[in-house]
Image (cartoon, coloured by chain):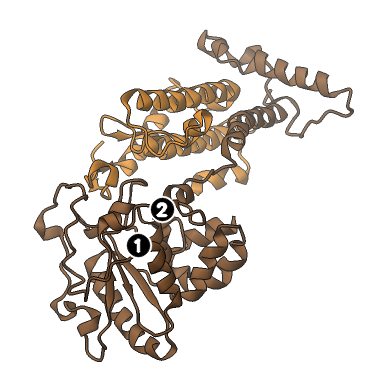
Chain colours: A brown, B orange
Amino acid sequence: MLWTWCLRMGDGFHSLHPLIYFPLSLGPHKFFLSFFHFTFPSFVIPNDPLVHCLECEKLAKHMELSRKDSTHVVFSLLKVMDTPYGKRGYDDRSDQCSFGRSRHCGFPSSSVTNVLRLPVEFRHQCVLSKAGSRDVGVKRVEKKLKLRVSGHLTSYHTPVPCPQSRQRQKSPQSYVKEPPTAHRRPPSQMKGARPISFSILTPGELPVFSHLPFLPTHFETLMRWEFGGPWGVTAMMIGFPMLMYYLWICLWFYDGQLVLPTSVAGIKPFINQMWTHIRDVSSPPLAAWGETQSSYPSPFT
Amino acid sequence: MPGYMQEGLPVPSLGYKTLMYKCNALYSVYFTFITAAVLHHYHIFRLTEIINNYGHIMSVAMIWGFAVSFGTYFWTVARGEQMRMSGNFIYDVFMGAALNPRIGPVDLKMWAEVRIPWVIVFFLAVSGACKQYELYGAFTPVCAVFPSI
């Protein structure tokens, strides 16, 4: 329950995630995720370009600060698509847009987990930055990913066209929000930023990562039973009509008192009595065939 | 009923198309009130019939509700439009297979969630009040609570 609630809180809850998420995540595979949460600062980079720019700016500032304490920054740029609401990442498997946001991920939106949990075709622009010297965590990730360091990232705003991405219907140009020009430079070129080397992933480079044992896939995390699963759902579909009938019987025949069997032996007659009430009085064919209310008892008469 | 045409949010599964929603609930509910008042006044359908036939109506509502649920499920599966299925039959029926089930312009989810139950609850309360008034010549304040809400 708390886990779900935690997710539903979305990004507003984000700063508290490491504190709350850790005790909740002591499952065998989730332990590693909590490790990531402590190791890396969590950045959400929505794919809305406007927000994206601001986030990049924040990121640059953060990098500036983090050079001292050697914090690692890992973030991802997702497949960017034109939608009526601007450019958004889109995940085919879960039919959700805005992958970068926690409430759509179904997962706390540590950027690392986002990168790792991306399907292969969406990882075409994963960017790992090495902002400090103590980048053991990043290197470990890189080692697993077998990253190819291909130089400096030139622009955040012109995504590398992904050959595997599906062509989607483009919306009218007027709907697409363009980022303001003041923010149109990558954080590495922003004022006060220092040169940072990046690793850029291309689509074919991460073929097996989603099968890592300790990371559930996006679908698995998103797909969870609600309402108690199949059994709970069945119980609700059977139990609620029964409850309705029971309350109605109590109102109609017993003057609003809640009737209960008085003994264990009385359970079966009680149920039979209940069924008799339902069968005799509330069966719809009686009403359908023109029976009037005078033919059966009513609490009003 | 006339109403304001409102564009919905873009739906990812439809290629970010938006669906139109006609917001005519206010006109509809006033129209329903007036119709009910007229029927009640001319003794065509007394409002007390609802509370008198409460058991019948409840049974029909249950049967009809289950029929709509299962019907929508099977219809969706037959058309191959189901989404985010778990693979468990009864769970999928409960959670719903179609994302935006519609009959013509009527959004079934909205319709079944808003237009049916609240009107029923309202008229149940009104019907109980009418019954009290017929029997006792007055009704208790409790009956006024729900309609006023």
Q: Residue at x 61, y 45 (%)?
A: B142
- Amino acid at dot 2: Ser
In which image quadrant can residue A197 be found?
Answer: bottom left
Q: Residue at x 54, y 45 (%)?
A: B146
Residue B7: x and y in percent read 23, 48
Distance from disc 1 to disc 2, alpha carbons, whole Å, reads: 17 Å
- Amino acid at dot 1: Gly
- The residue that mark 1 highlights is A100
Residue B141: x and y in percent read 61, 46
Spot the residue most to the left: A173
Q: Residue at x 28, y 75 (%)?
A: A198
- The residue that mark 2 highlights is A210
* Side of A297 where A236 appears, left or right: left
Looking at the picture, tell me which residue is in the foreground, B98 or B5: B98
Q: Secondary structure at mark 1?
A: loop
Looking at the picture, tell me which residue is in the foreground, B21 or A73: A73
Which chain does tag 1 point to? Answer: A
